[in-house]
Image (cartoon, grey):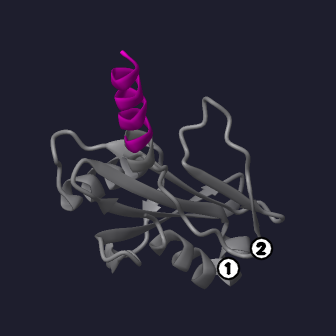
């Protein structure tokens, strides 16, 4: 009985070690936000001027392709939420070598322009969705740092 219990505990610890949350390196001037139990993000951080970066992961049980997810996200944001896609989906590669797409959207709310970036990385059973957004005026000077952060998703 003791041997079985130890084996089960050992398997549980091994399983937990393999289930590490996904990560994203946040820009230097961003502060991580504590995650609550309901928070769907693996990582969230904000800047003093209201910009935000985040990473969440979603299961991909049907093994849908990067092209599928790029089109689905674009359709949801443009047709469903009123965003405008800026240019085309940009092919990118994460720091870990996973092919992805970077999508840039804009929207105007009460006369204020906002920019929203989404980097998608499809792994065998999961899709990583790295995001950043804020007032366009605040995002512009941080764009290089934000881009690096999004591409650090793993």
Gap between marks 1 and 2 measured at Cα: 9 Å
In the image, the segment drawn in magenta is 1-14
| Image position of 44 with respect to 135: above or below | above
Which residue bears the numbered disc 2? 29
Residue visible at 46% across and 74% down? 151
Q: Quadrant of residue 15?
A: top left
All told, the count of numbered labels is: 2
For image coordinates 62% across by 80% down, the residue present is 145
Q: Which residue is mark 1?
A: 142
Q: Position of residue 135 (x, y in %)?
A: 70, 64
Disc 1 or disc 2, which is closer to the eye? 2
Please check the rendered image and state whether residue 144 is part of the magenta-colored stretch, yes or no.
Answer: no
Instruction: Identify the secondary structure beneath mark 1.
Output: helix
Residue 69 vertical placement versus 102 (above, below): above
On screen, residue 20 versus residue 87, left or right, reads: right
Residue 100, position as x, y percentages in the image: 31, 69
Q: Is residue 90 above or below residue 50?
A: below
Quadrant position of residue 146: bottom right
Magenta highlight: main SS: helix
Q: Nearer the viewer, residue 133 or 63?
A: 63
Residue at left 39%, top 55%? 128
Instruction: Give the side of residue 40 with respect to residue 129, left or right.
Output: right
User: Which residue is farthest top?
Assistant: 1
> Residue 39, image x and y in percent?
60, 36
User: Helix, strand, or loop for circle 2?
Assistant: loop
């Amino acid at each position: 009985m003791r041997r079985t219990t130890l084996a089960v505990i050992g398997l549980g610890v091994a399983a937990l070690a393999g289930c590490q949350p996904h990560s994203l390196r946040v820009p230097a001037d961003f502060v991580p936000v504590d995650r609550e139990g309901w928070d769907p993000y693996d990582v969230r951080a904000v800047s003093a001027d209201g910009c935000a970066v985040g990473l969440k992961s979603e299961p991909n049980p049907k093994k849908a392709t990067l092209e599928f997810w790029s089109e689905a996200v674009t359709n949801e944001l443009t047709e469903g939420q009123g965003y405008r896609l800026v240019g085309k989906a940009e092919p990118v590669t994460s720091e870990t070598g996973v092919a992805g797409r970077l999508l840039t959207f804009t929207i105007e709310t009460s006369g204020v322009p906002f920019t929203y970036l989404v980097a998608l990385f499809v792994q065998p059973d999961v899709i990583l969705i790295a995001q950043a957004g804020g007032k366009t005026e605040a995002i512009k000077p941080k764009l290089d740092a934000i881009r690096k952060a999004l591409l650090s998703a793993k």
